[in-house]
Amino acid sequence: MNGIAVLAYSGGLDTSCAIAWLKEDYAFEEVVAVLVDVGQEAMFQPAIERGKLAGADDVMLLDRKEAFADEQVAKALLANALYEEKYPLVSALSRPVIAEAVAEVALELGADAVVHGCTGKGNDQLRFELAFKAKYPGVKVIAPLRDRMWTRDAEIAYAEARGIPVEARAESPYSVDDNLFGRAIEAGILEDPWTAPPEEAFLLTGDPSAAPAPTDVVVSFDQGLPVSLDGEELPLYALVGVLNERAGAYGIGRIDMIENRAVGIKSRELYEAPAALALIAAHRALEELVLTKGELVAKRELEPKWAKLVYDGGWFAPVRSAYDAFFAATQELVTGDVRLSLQPGVAVLSGRRSEHALYSESLASYGIGETFPHDAAAGFIGITALETDLVAARKRVQVA
Ligand code: ARG
């Protein structure tokens, strides 16, 4: 007999069956299922019961919504993180929080193994396992759904034979993962990249063609983080929730992409992340107003590297903290307001202001009263053009 296994439990059919399987096939004496609330759309009570019926000795529900918002979501916003320029890392951000919670429970119980329900084809196995290894050095990791592939029908038969409730309502025809920062939708008919996303695949966003009349929303930032909407201060997790609803009504934040997974395959993925995309656009706009050219150049170079690192499971890598230290150092003066006009399918930037703006109207203006040092311009061109003059003169000699 093995001792204790601690499982990252979602409440779905896969991880419910995994509980029974850990006892029967892997011979664990005790299985503790840890269900982490990161703001997903889920019925926690039935999930807990299902876990118990599957044979879990304990099903723990841990609320990590605020911690997730204040740590992973906040850092992703400071980093303007978009994997392959599009995907705001919704699932990739939640894995470190879930894995850390599981590892904490496992350490406390002196568990013999930690378990996740990922298959061998996705990125999540990488994220879970790197996080487990970082947070519980030397722990044994088990991935039952990678060890043996199940067909859906076999899984249902397995569950039914053990009295594990298979959801009464038909399960989604897609593979869905969600949290407070957004929602990922894949598989089923979406596997054909020529198939248009059906409206029913979306939950957080409405059909843009049925959007209400445009409205403005003012997002205020303090040191790079959004702190209020239209003057109402909100903690980050709540602010994201409110903006998801407001921007989601316009169909803002839908993403349809062919994504390069860490395991070498391309996959077709849909996302809906209204607040994430609106906030990143607003944050970038405020940075443009406040940061120096040098800071912007350096930061924009690092941002996609941060996104790739986190996508590839590197949340607990030292280099991620080093990137974050750099980003944080640039944000001290990124305080101000950004106005977005919410329109069908898009949040259009319509204004920005900050007491720390480097933008100077009197320097930039073409109107009267401007202060640009015009006399200096001719000298500036003369020096800048020295090399161009030399190259041109050399050509003339060569032609002659
Ligand atoms: N491809 C995305 C990622 O790797 C989303 C994965 C979400 N999982 C799911 N079962 N839909 O971050």
Image (cartoon, rainbow, N blue to C red):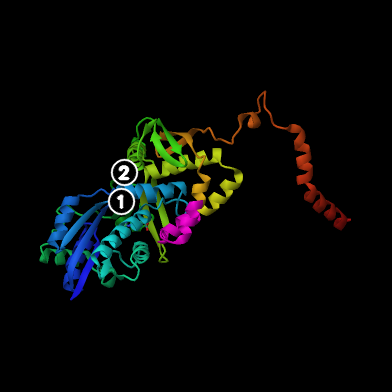
The residue positioned 50% from the left and 40% from the top of the image is: 334
Q: Give the range drawn in magenta.
A: 304-325
The residue positioned 78% from the left and 51% from the top of the image is: 387
Which quadrant of the view contains residue 280? top left
Asked whether the beta carbons under mark 1 and mark 2 sit within 8 Å of each other, the answer is: yes
Instruction: Tell me where residue 116 appears, x and y as whole percent.
Output: 28, 64
Does residue 330 appear left or right of residue 54 in this picture? right
The secondary structure type at the circle numbered 1 is strand
Q: Is residue 256 above or below residue 26?
A: above
Instruction: Tell me where residue 183 appears, x and y as whole percent.
Output: 33, 49
Give the quarter of the figure containing the C terminus.
Answer: bottom right
Q: Is residue 239 above or below residue 113?
A: above
Does residue 113 appear left or right of residue 304 in this picture? left
Disc 1 target residue:
178
Does residue 329 appear left or right of residue 270 in this picture? right
The residue positioned 26% from the left and 54% from the top of the image is: 36
| Near-viewer residue (319 or 21) | 319
Q: Identify residue type, mark 1.
A: Asp
| Near-viewer residue (257 or 87) | 87
Disc 2 target residue:
204
Instruction: Tell me where residue 282 appears, x and y as whole percent.
Output: 46, 39
Q: Identify residue type, mark 2.
A: Leu
